[in-house]
Image: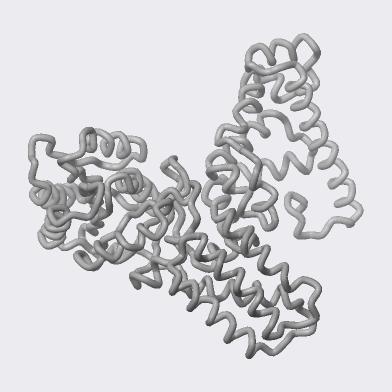
Amino acid sequence: MFENLSERLEGAFKKLKGQGKINEINIAETLKEVRRALVDADVNYKIAKEFVDSVKTRALGLDVLKSVSPGQQMVKLVHDELVKLMGTQAETINLSGKPSIILMSGLQGSGKTTFSGKLAAHLKKKGNAVLLTACDVYRPAAIEQLKTVSTAVGADFYSEPENKNPIEIAQHAVHEAKVKGINTVIIDTAGRLAVDEEMMDEIGRIKDAIQPNEILFVVDAMTGQDAVNTAEAFNAKLNFDGVVLTKLDGDTRGGAALSIRKQVDKPIKFVGTGEKMDALDVFHPDRMATRILGMGDIVSLVEKAQETIDEEEAKRLQKKFKKNQFDFEDFLGQIKQIKKMGNLKDLMGMIPGMGKAMKNVDIEDDALKHTEAMILSMTPSERRNPGLLDAKRRKRIANGSGTTVSDVNQLVKQLQQMQKMMKQFNKMNKKGKVPKNMPFMN
């Protein structure tokens, strides 16, 4: 996410490295590179110019802090302007209706249907009952796709395959939700390859007929400045409430995320970061700014962990760590927890300093599958008592998991190292050498 932009901005800040203080000359040199980086990321030229002019004005009027280097000061200024550019704070969707009606809009291929499923999953986690409604009566298999998505996330589904009137379908779906006591209706509408009058007229009539609480414009972040132009056309017709950027995990330059709020004056509310139904994040401008500047996003990482980690399981593990009894059953449980949190490379990018380190490292979503396969190839007694794993058993495990004996040996070694480390921590804790707030030691 934003790797190229992050790298270019880092290069710009290096111009201040080793300099004693910020002055007009080095500010100009640095911000020239910042502007180029933004334009290359497909940010509108006028917006890029306004951005650097604002940073320059603040930098020239800055009271120099002796304890902070010029480079750090400039990073802070750029960070603050990025937050301001992208919207200052996270914004929620309006769920005040009975039922609440959310209307999706966007071009074909933008990811509306997939996002509808992700949003349904997101809202269900918060205790809402959701009805996904198929109003795309033109695209082949559109109804089946939404039905599959609804099944995957456990949401209710409504369609009328023989009815070619999307306005009627939307109205009937809202009635169905009222009858069944479902409090949220998501309407997935048709898209086109380009903005056209027929599409705009149709979605406008759907809006008038159902009076949605929330209209979201879904756009593919990889389309760059074109995404902003399309957003302006849809907003002129619908006056939508918020933007959803999909495919932000792809090879995107980031221009849409940085420009769309400024040009359309509508907040980005969600971003899609993968194909899985849980690959959806609420958009936080401040967190996105820190990620763009290579500073990670620990807050989001912690939130993801809190959503997926079972509290009782954490307490059970804490006791086992204290007794140095961590085994392969526990190892397997940890793998499953990590997989629930999402894409591994994206998670690593949330750790400060890791984004750059992971740039050219290809981490697949199933990177842990071999480790998981090896543990699953063990018997329950072997998982609980790794000391049983002699050469014969290790060979059987390698054959059963499609790995090598060397892989199994390495896995056993990793567990032994973890056990050794925990043993040392426990000894230090008994002697009072470990801080009281150290994880697993309290």
- Determine which quarter of the picture holds residue 45: bottom left
- Determine which quarter of the picture holds residue 47: bottom left
How many marks do you count on the picture?
0
Q: Residue furthest right?
A: 431
Q: Specify whether 50 is left or right of 363.
A: left
* Screen quadrant of the C terminus: bottom right
Q: In the image, what residue occupies the spot 42% across and 60% down?
A: 256
Q: In the image, what residue occupies the spot 30% across and 58% down?
A: 217
Picture coordinates of residue 86, whole percent (x, y): 46, 69
Q: Specify whether 235 is left or right of 19.
A: left
- Determine which quarter of the picture holds residue 37: bottom right
208 and 374: which is toward the camera:
208
Q: Is residue 95 above or below residue 366?
A: below
Can residue 313 be seen here? yes
Picture coordinates of residue 4, whole percent (x, y): 58, 55
Query: How is this picture coloured?
Result: one colour
Q: In the image, what residue occupies the spot 74% across and 21% down?
A: 408
Picture coordinates of residue 182, whole percent (x, y): 23, 50
Picture coordinates of residue 20, whole percent (x, y): 80, 81
212 and 245: which is toward the camera:
245
Q: Specify whether 359 is left or right of 67.
A: left
Q: Is residue 86 above or below residue 206?
A: below
Can residue 131 be seen here? no
